[in-house]
Amino acid sequence: MRDRVGVPLRGIIATPVTPLTEDGAVDQFTHERLVRFLVANGAHGIAVPTHMGESLGLSLDERLMLAQRTVACVDGLVPVVVHVSATDRRDVIRLSTNAERIGASGVLVHPPYHSRLTVPALEDYFTSILSVLNIPVYGYNSRLEGGYTLPGDLVASLANTWDHFRGIKDISGSIDYLTEVCAFAARADREFSVLAGGEHLVAVMSLGGHGSFAGAFAIVPRMVRTLYEACLQQNLAVARPLQYKLGSLLRVLSVHYPARYKIALEIMGRPTGRLRLEVGGDYQSERSIVEGVLHEIGAMDTEPLGWSAPE
């Protein structure tokens, strides 16, 4: 278990949706098919079930099952990070210790939902999780207006205190925050990962970050992989146009999140069912909007259609 602490999290960490059957049950067969697709198309890691995967709409047993099936399906080919955030700390700890038991490569922890903790209380919260684990723990910095943030100085304190606090996922959209945590990672005495929440790779990697958690990778894997490789080579002439094109897709997909991600997957020939909790919007209108942007960015001509992964 301790050996996994030394493996840094880098690259494209795919965050799949959770496939559901017509009656709303988790579709385990399609989930494993999607995971195999992601690995076969070049994902450097898998994170399940994130907010993209409707984590808060799943039962604890379903989340435990998805973690176990994902680790078994990946079979060591890439790291598996289990998203363990929940409203009850006891559930977070149960999900976390289960992740370590089944062989996951780490856990991703969001600050407590619906509770705006003081910094000392937030540090105590993360300490209670770190103290029961040996595998890497990655903090999840959310948007400032939501009140669920991990201040940069707290990130540094946790990393300096706990050897296995190994990185941060940042979806804040704050360039100041991203600069602060990337600067910490650059001067840290061990590997510390900074990954964007979403495929904003030019921004995070130009500051010294290491990749992103990527929901759109399941839709346009070739584009995301090419963008990552261009950023890794610091080839901005290639990276910038790709980032602009991908940005057009991300702006459309962010509306009625994550419903449009599932619609896009269906259009690309990889259906995963509807959401457990529908967010509204006329389906045909939504499909037309998503299909339009997929054509606009050339995805229908350049990306894999169907399940181009080993069965």
Image (tube, helix red, strand yellow):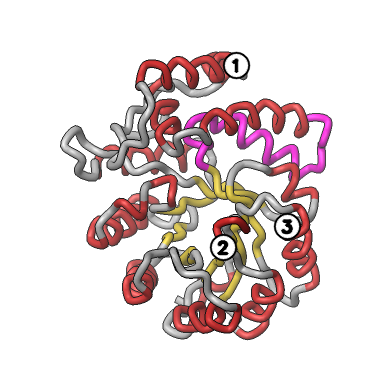
Q: Which mark is residue 280?
A: none
Q: Residue at x 39, y 42 (%)?
A: 17
User: Can you tell which mark lies on residue 298?
Assistant: 1
The secondary element bearing badge 3 is classed as helix
Q: Report if residue 105 lies within the magenta region.
A: no
Q: How far apart are labels 1 and 3 at the CA level?
A: 31 Å
Residue 29 as seen in the image, left or right of residue 310: left
Within-10-Å neighbours for mark 3: few <14, some 14–19, many 20+: many
Identify residue type, mark 3.
Answer: Leu
Q: Which image quadrant: the N terminus?
A: bottom left
Classify 10 Å Cα crowding around label 2: few (below 14), some (14-19), many (20 and above): some
Q: Of helix, strand and loop, which one carries label 1?
A: loop
Identify the image quadrant of residue 31.
top left
- In the image, 94: left or right of 110? left
The reply to whether callout 2 and callout 1 are in contact (CB within 8 Å) is: no
Are circles 2 and 3 on residues that touch, CB within 8 Å? no
Asked if the residue at tag 3 contacts the one at tag 1, i.e. Cβ–Cβ closer than 8 Å, the answer is: no
Residue at left 79%, top 53%? 207
Q: Residue at x 19, y 43 (%)?
A: 25
Query: Looking at the image, which is closer to me, 105 or 260?
Result: 260
Q: Earlier in the sequence, mark 2 or mark 3?
A: 2
Q: What residue would you read off at disc 3?
A: 178
Please, what secondary structure does the residue beneath circle 2 have?
Answer: loop
Give the magenta-colored segment's residue range. 215-238
Q: Earlier in the sequence, mark 2 or mark 1?
A: 2
Q: Position of residue 28 (x, y in %)?
A: 24, 44
* Residue carrying label 2: 147
- Where residue 298 sits in the image (x, y, percent)? 60, 16
Asked where in the image residue 122 lies, by quadrant, the reply is: bottom right
Give how far across and how far down residue 209 sits, in percent: 72, 55
Q: Give the percent coordinates (x, y) of residue 273.
A: 29, 32
